[in-house]
Image: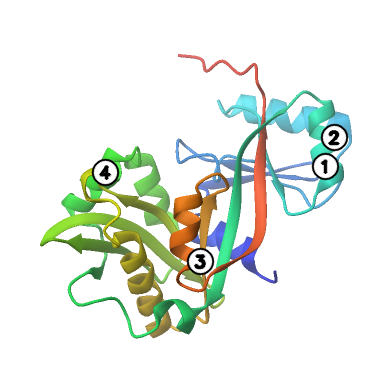
Amino acid sequence: MSGIWDAIDATWAAPRLHRVGPFTLREGQGGGQRVSAATTDQVPKPAEIAAAAQAMRALGQRPLFMVRGAQRAFDAALEAAGYEVNDPVIVMEAPIDTVARDGPPPVSAFPIWPPLQIMQEIWAEGGIGPERLAIMAGSCDPKTAILGRVKDRAAGCAFVAIHAGIAVMHAVEVSPALRRMGTARNMARGGADWARRHGATRFAILTVADNAASQGVFTSLGMVPVEHYHYRRDPNWTETP
């Protein structure tokens, strides 16, 4: 779908980009796979894949490639080179008004920037630490964090940023003891409501392909799958201490 890949890149932006042959290499600085993966719109030759892998090793990163949409020939080339599949992801999207509706229920979701300490603690509980918080800070504007509340307690948080009219929600995390109470749904509605007020017309979210519960939440908000991607990574990578 038009613009979605650019929006995903801009709203969760790699600290640095490098060009190696037909590849865009992302220097993630610990910010996760999406900001550390190499992408290309071409079908690379084996030597070009090898050169990109070597450049990633030189950055201290595991050779990692993102295969977007229907890049079957690229995927086959990586498979032939010995790269293993990791983390298939579904991109879901809907018109902003479909998700936002009349906004979240009262006192259930609040846009806050920069994130509060309690939000940082909730993220940390889910493995989202300082490196990923740095990715949020360095991503495009406008942006905000969403604090979800339930039972008068801080229950979850998420990050939303807007690029070219598309709002993308990332880093959705709900405290384990407070799950299945509607917090993720309320944060999505709150994030879409904030994004609508900042000019967005579409709302997107990324969900791991085998997380049926997450997909069910966003399907209930009228969101539908529009794209998909997965990673191929070097299975023999050993990080140097």
Circles 2 and 1: CB distance less than 8 Å?
yes
Circles 3 and 2: CB distance less than 8 Å?
no
* Image point (27%, 39%), residue name: 125
Visual colour scheme: rainbow
The residues tagged by marks 4 and 2 sit, at their Cα atoms, a distance apart of: 40 Å
The residues tagged by marks 2 and 1 sit, at their Cα atoms, a distance apart of: 5 Å
Can you tell which mark lies on residue 74?
1
Q: Which quarter of the picture shows residue 105?
A: bottom left
The residues tagged by marks 1 and 3 sit, at their Cα atoms, a distance apart of: 30 Å
Tell me the residue that label 3 is attached to: 219
Q: Nearer the viewer, mark 4 or mark 2?
A: 4
The residues tagged by marks 4 and 1 sit, at their Cα atoms, a distance apart of: 38 Å
- The percent position of residue 59, horizontal first and vertical second, equals 58, 29
Can you tell which mark lies on residue 176?
4
* Image point (37%, 59%), residue name: 159
Circles 1 and 3: CB distance less than 8 Å?
no
- The percent position of residue 195, horizontal first and vertical second, equals 41, 77
Q: Is residue 74 above or below residue 81?
A: below
Q: Amino acid at mark 4?
A: Pro
Quadrant where the C terminus is found in the figure: top left
